[in-house]
Amino acid sequence: MTIKEAIRERHSVRQYQDRPIEEETRLALEELIGRCNAESGLHIQLICGDTGCFESFLAHYGKFRNVRSYIALVGSSSLNGLEEKCGYFGQRIVLEAQCMGLNTCWVAGTYSKGKCQAELDGDEKLVCVIAIGYGENSGSRHKSKTFDKLSAVPEAEMPDWFRSGMIGAMMAPTAVNQQKFFVELEGDEAKITAKKGFLTKLDLGIVKYNFEAASGHKCR
Ligand SMILES: Cc1cc2nc3c(=O)[nH]c(=O)nc-3n(C[C@H](O)[C@H](O)[C@H](O)COP(=O)(O)O)c2cc1C
């Protein structure tokens, strides 16, 4: 599966099979996380075999079942653009994980933050987690806002790469599917901004990653 296919295939999955991530796959994920940390300065961690983080009332209310592994997005509070970076690098991991046959769900609310097994050094902060494992199902496609709500560029005037990027961005996960982002075309560059609101900076990093991967163009 290519990353572009992974963008289309990925949906949030909240129910998992009761089996651990295969050793080879786990090692590949660890290796990828190591590269993301080296590039970003984040301290992302893969935690396997912990049932506590998703056993609270909140997690059941959120319909989570059998979450045994998760990725903790952690970074120093003093890191510039901490939340956007977590979104960007977290989504890179999510899409690679999809290619490895895994399913995921971004989770900022319906888990037990206090029971999360991530290590926090110095001034580090836990931004959110991503549930990961072999899904009981593959989730379903979310409803999306239309092109005209997400960009001022008329669809008919979009360069092909920009339109591909927009479709990738529309398929990106955002908190409560809020899609509070806006994409502009400045010269030959796309500029994506977050609207005001809850978790929109985290969403922005996720959307930027999807846009870039779908269009093959870096964005601002
Ligand atoms: C930053 C962020 C936080 C999220 N937090 C939660 C959460 O606490 N609980 C939950 O069940 N889903 C959570 N989600 C999943 C979203 O509800 C989901 O991505 C969105 O509805 C779009 O659906 P899709 O991922 O299937 O495309 C979160 C997603 C993002 C991006």
Image: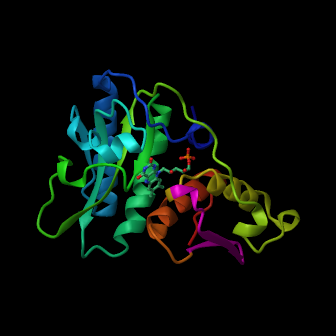
* Residue 171 is a magenta residue: no
Which residue ends up furthest to the left in the rendered image?
A: 122
| Closer to us: 156 or 12 | 12
* Residue 193 is a magenta residue: yes
* Residue at the spot 57% in from the left edge and 31% down from the top edge: 1
Q: Main secondary structure of the magenta part?
A: strand
Residue 213 horizontal/vertical position (percent): 58, 52
Lateral position of residue 103 relative to residue 9, left or right: left
Residue 22 visible, this angle: yes
| Closer to us: 175 or 47 | 175
Lateral position of residue 42 relative to residue 108, left or right: left
Residue 174 visible, this angle: no
Lateral position of residue 153 relative to residue 137, left or right: right
Magenta span: 176-194
The image quadrant of residue 52 is: top left
* Residue at the spot 32% in from the left edge and 26% down from the top edge: 21
Residue 91 horizontal/vertical position (percent): 46, 51
Residue 200 horizontal/vertical position (percent): 49, 68
Q: In the rendered view of the protein, which quadrant contains the C terminus?
A: bottom right
The image quadrant of residue 78 is: bottom left
